[in-house]
């Protein structure tokens, strides 16, 4: 097989965001566009590491994925990669890729997904690079990839290679003096084995089957037509004995059935409705690439992701993996509520606050200082891999329920009684005009910098629900990585009030068009008699303050958010 050196020229805007490069499918379909980016990923691996190395490749099954896999195969061959490990049919969840990179000691992995963004010919596509620890490439590497995209002049490709993606096994080619192998691997096997090491499957089987004294436990898990379908079937049905009827939307579809594969109460409203009937004790949904999860209790009781990770921390002894490894430390992304901090303090372990994006947890895990972490954006995970992990989170909840023999709602009530409740809401203003959004953030940065609001009292809400908060501090979050000392700036403007309540503003780094503004609001309530109040009502005064201070409506023309989570 011969290598072709193909002339090309740079495309604008190939800058990886919070989680890889995400654009409309039509953008990736442009001649040379995908090839350019893949070449720059490969070129970011130092030559001595790259020659003969193994890379893992897989994605969430969305439209254009198979084409992208073929491009990667042809270019890996031409660039002296030794072996590609690819999921059968191109399918690997994001957590599965992380698992296999680590298991096979691969040099890295290329993930083909735009996560929770819609798919199909008019939807989004994405490419993400993960490094040898199994986690998303840190910014030093994504910046290097971006800078290469700005000067690229040619790429290498072997046009003559075609590969059978659907048959498990290895195929090899001789390419100008080196051997190139493609290994097609079962998409779910390695991940399933890992879950069996982490959790007590016998305990979970008994929970689901029921015993003489205990009725079978009923749940519904929705794959939202994303990649988790085959994983749910294998793990929940085949391994744990759950009936097929406990799973929903498990056929992966290129366009996710026309919906956002985003596990929240808006986009997984069908699941919420099913839970509201009261017949099931637990519900879960997962995003397109399987790294996010939403947890619901009976009657649609919603568990915020911020609480979910904190509850798992508080009940870590229900999970054999944590019993074995101990809980070394916990962490959350900055906008995530402080619930997990309170658990960490009680357990006497370190608690870290990192910028938004899973890549910031990797160093802490590699340094053995972090075992369990989460993001408010429905991301929960541990150091068993280096990605957030939706199915893992669901199995963690099943384990807690099996050990405690309590309902989801009672577990939460108990948790709030012990630690107080952190009310949390995030409002997204999607697809607003980029210029207005930028100006709004500029104004907030300026307000933080000149400290004009510090010590001021601000009032929101109306009538009886009016509430006044005093500003303690305001800043633009900056993070110094405790392991490598790298500083990451401008990660979101925070207003912190004297009672610990917070309002945070940041722009999304995962959208593909316009801008998305995220406003996060959090307040703490120690008083048990108020724990069952509706978060949106409790947080209304703070939200009013957020909108006033940011002039969001003026800058964007938006009266209401697109999505509230
Ligand atoms: C969003 C979330 C962030 C998450 C990221 C990737 O980023 O806020 O917490 O890590 O998506 O998740 P942003 O920049 O749009 O706020 V996923 O499931 O796309 O891999
Ligand atoms: Co995702």
Image (cartoon, grey):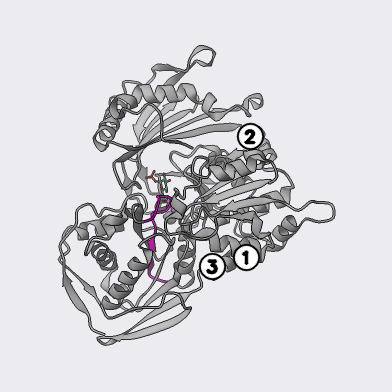
Q: Is residue 234 visible?
A: yes
Question: How many neighbours does mark 3 have within 10 angstroms: few (below 14), some (14-19), or many (20 or more)?
Answer: many
Q: Are marks 1 and 2 in contact (CB under 8 Å)?
A: no
Majority secondary structure in the magenta region: loop
Picture quadrant where residue 125 is located: bottom left
What secondary structure is found at the residue carrying circle 3? loop
Q: Which residues are magenta?
A: 105-120
Could you say which quadrant of the image residue 458 lies in? top left
Q: Which residue is mark 2?
A: 416
Which circle marks residue 128 in the picture?
Answer: none
Q: Earlier in the sequence, mark 1 or mark 3?
A: 3
* Tag 1 and tag 3, C-beta contact below 8 Å: no
SS at badge 1:
helix
Give the x, y percent position of residue 534. Answer: 58, 28
Instruction: Return the residue at label 3.
Output: 188
Residue 116 falls inside the magenta stretch: yes
Spatial CA span between label 1 and label 2: 31 Å
For the residues bearing labels 3 and 2, Cβ distance under 8 angstroms: no
């Amino acid at each position: 097989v011969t290598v072709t050196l193909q002339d090309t020229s740079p495309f604008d805007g190939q800058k990886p965001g919070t989680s890889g490069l995400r654009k409309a499918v039509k953008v990736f379909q442009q001649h040379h566009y995908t090839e350019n980016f893949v070449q720059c990923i490969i070129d970011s691996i130092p030559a001595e590491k790259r020659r003969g190395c193994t890379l893992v490749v897989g994605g969430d099954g969305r439209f254009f994925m198979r084409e992208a896999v073929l491009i990667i195969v042809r270019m890996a061959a031409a660039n002296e990669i030794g072996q590609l490990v690819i999921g059968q049919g191109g399918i690997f969840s994001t957590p599965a890729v992380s698992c296999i990179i680590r298991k096979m000691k691969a040099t890295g992995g290329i993930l083909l997904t735009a996560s929770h963004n819609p798919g199909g010919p008019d939807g989004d596509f994405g490419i993400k690079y993960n490094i040898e620890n199994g986690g998303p490439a840190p910014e030093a590497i994504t910046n290097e990839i971006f800078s290469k995209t700005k000067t690229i002049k040619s790429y290498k490709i072997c046009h003559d290679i075609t590969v059978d993606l659907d048959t498990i096994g290895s195929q090899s080619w001789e390419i100008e003096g080196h051997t190139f192998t493609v290994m097609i691997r079962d998409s779910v096997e390695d991940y399933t084995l890992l879950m069996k090491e982490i959790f007590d499957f016998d305990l979970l089987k008994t929970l689901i089957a029921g015993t003489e004294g205990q009725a079978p436990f009923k749940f519904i898990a929705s794959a939202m037509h994303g990649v988790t379908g085959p994983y749910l079937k294998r793990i929940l049905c085949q391994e744990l004995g759950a009936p097929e009827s406990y799973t929903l939307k498990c056929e992966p579809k290129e366009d996710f059935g026309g919906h956002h594969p985003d596990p929240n109460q808006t986009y997984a409203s069908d699941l919420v409705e099913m839970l509201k009937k009261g017949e099931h004790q637990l519900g879960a949904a997962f995003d397109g690439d399987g790294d996010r999860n939403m947890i619901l209790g009976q009657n649609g009781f919603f568990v915020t992701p911020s609480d979910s990770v904190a509850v798992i921390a508080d009940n870590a002894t229900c999970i054999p993996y944590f019993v074995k490894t101990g809980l070394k430390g916990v962490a959350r992304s900055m906008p995530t509520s402080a619930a997990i901090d309170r658990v960490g303090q009680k357990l006497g372990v370190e608690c870290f606050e990192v910028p938004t994006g899973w890549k910031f947890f990797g160093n802490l895990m590699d340094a053995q200082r972090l075992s369990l972490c989460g993001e408010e954006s429905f991301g929960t995970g541990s150091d068993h891999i280096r990605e957030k992990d939706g199915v893992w989170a669901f199995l963690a909840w099943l384990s807690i329920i099996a050990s405690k023999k309590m309902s989801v709602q009672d577990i939460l009530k108990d948790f709030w009684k012990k630690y107080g409740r952190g009310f949390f809401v995030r409002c997204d203003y999607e697809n607003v005009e980029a210029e207005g959004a930028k100006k709004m953030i500029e104004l907030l940065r300026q307000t933080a910098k000149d400290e004009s609001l510090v010590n001021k009292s601000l009032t929101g809400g109306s009538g009886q629900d009016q509430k006044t908060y005093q500003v303690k501090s305001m800043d633009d979050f900056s993070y110094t990585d405790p392991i490598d000392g790298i500083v990451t700036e401008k990660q979101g403007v925070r207003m912190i009030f004297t009672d610990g309540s917070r309002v945070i503003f940041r722009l999304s780094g995962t959208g593909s068009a316009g801008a998305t503004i995220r406003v996060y609001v959090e307040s703490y309530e120690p008083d048990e008699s108020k724990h069952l109040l509706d978060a949106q009502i409790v947080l209304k005064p703070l939200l009013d303050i957020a909108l006033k201070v940011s002039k969001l409506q003026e800058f964007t023309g938006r009266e209401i958010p697109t999505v509230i989570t």
